Amino acid sequence: MTAPGNWKPFTPTAQAVRIMATTDPTQNKRLAVFLDQHRNAAAGFPDGRAWWGYVERAANGADMPGLVGELQPVCADSMIRGKFYKGWQAPWYPDSKYINRTIGLMDGNHFEIDYASMEIDYRAAEEAYYQFAITAALAHELPVPTIGGLVDYRVRAIAGKPPRSPRIAQAAKVGHQWLLGFSDEKDELLERLISAASGHFEIPTPDQMRSTADDTAALMQQVKDLQAQMQALFAKAGDDVLVPSDEKPKKKRVMSEAQKAALAKGRQAHAQKSALDFAPGGAR
């Protein structure tokens, strides 16, 4: 598992080393480590997962130090201010606004990710998005998505990518091992939900894959049948209808009524095939 691009592992820079080593009381900014609520002794996190960031003392020297910027996960085993912290990486990280709300409100360096507010926000965003996506799909005669389900790529071109699913917040809240970075055993549903919100290709479920394969096979059979009908009609019309590409007739030949009827049927079959190819949900 790798961390997303907007997250970075702790790598002590020259500035960070100076901050960790300094004993100058006038130094207001220092490196600090915070621990979230996800304790897992078996995985090596008895006190929670470690996050790092900078804190700055208030100018009056009396108020509690405040966080400068956002917390970042400690992605590799590190010694920070003389203490060892086990590194971790996860397939998903919460938005910073759900982290910063409890910084400084709990004892010591612990904090809690606000999953309750996250779930409420994600659910409201999901409902608003799918209402718009369903309206757009109906207006353009495209496959209509179900709330929380896969969205056709043509509908996404109109409505945009889906927001985060509230099921992600629910899974994190109850301590899902893969989502929190405690296990490498992937959860296919959560992986699909995370990929969908990131604008990546959605991974269909096995049932959806089987259904898509059946529909594609049926459509291809229809196309083959139409092609066979067209070939039979043109063969019946005779050679007068066909002109070799390397030889043009000097005089236009007049088709019989039977040949004209056969040609009309061939064109009609071709039109039916084109309608299948470009109908909503048809082959491309």
Image (cartoon, rainbow, N blue to C red):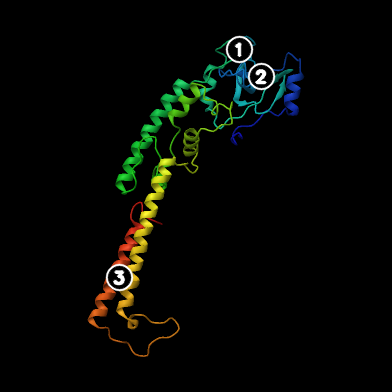
Please name whichever residue, 280 or 4, is drawn nearer the observer in this view of the structure: 280
Structural crowding at the residue carrying mark 2, measured as other residues with C-alpha within 10 Å and reported as few (<14), some (14–19) or many (≥20): some
Q: Position of residue 212 (x, y in %)?
A: 40, 48
Residue 102 at x, y = what percent? 53, 17
Mark nearer the N terminus (1 vs 3) = 1
Q: Nearer the viewer, mark 1 or mark 3?
A: 3
Q: Quadrant of the N terminus?
A: top right
Residue designated by label 1: 64
Residue 20: quadrant of the picture: top right
Residue at image position (49%, 44%) is 201
| Quarter of the rendering containing residue 258 | bottom left
User: For residue 32, which numbered disc appears in the image?
Assistant: 2
Pointers 2 and 1 in contact (CB under 8 A)?
Answer: no
Tell me whether the residue at label 2 lies in contact with that at label 3, contact meaning CB atoms closer than 8 angstroms.
no
Of residues 197 and 213, the one nearer the viewer is 213
The residue positioned 43% from the left and 86% from the top of the image is 247
Q: Secondary structure at mark 3?
A: helix
| Residue 57, placed above or below residue 152 | above
Which residue is depicted at the point 72% across and 15% down?
26
Q: Residue at x 44, y 35 (%)?
A: 163
Instruction: Give the Cα separation between the discs numbered 1 and 3.
Output: 81 Å
Instruction: Give the residue type at disc 2.
Output: Ala
Q: Position of residue 164 (x, y in %)?
A: 46, 32
Residue at image mark 3: 267
Image location of residue 199, percent across then percent down: 48, 41
Rounded to the nearest whole Å, what is the CA distance between mark 2 and mark 3? 75 Å
**Viewer-proximal residue, 89 or 119?**
89
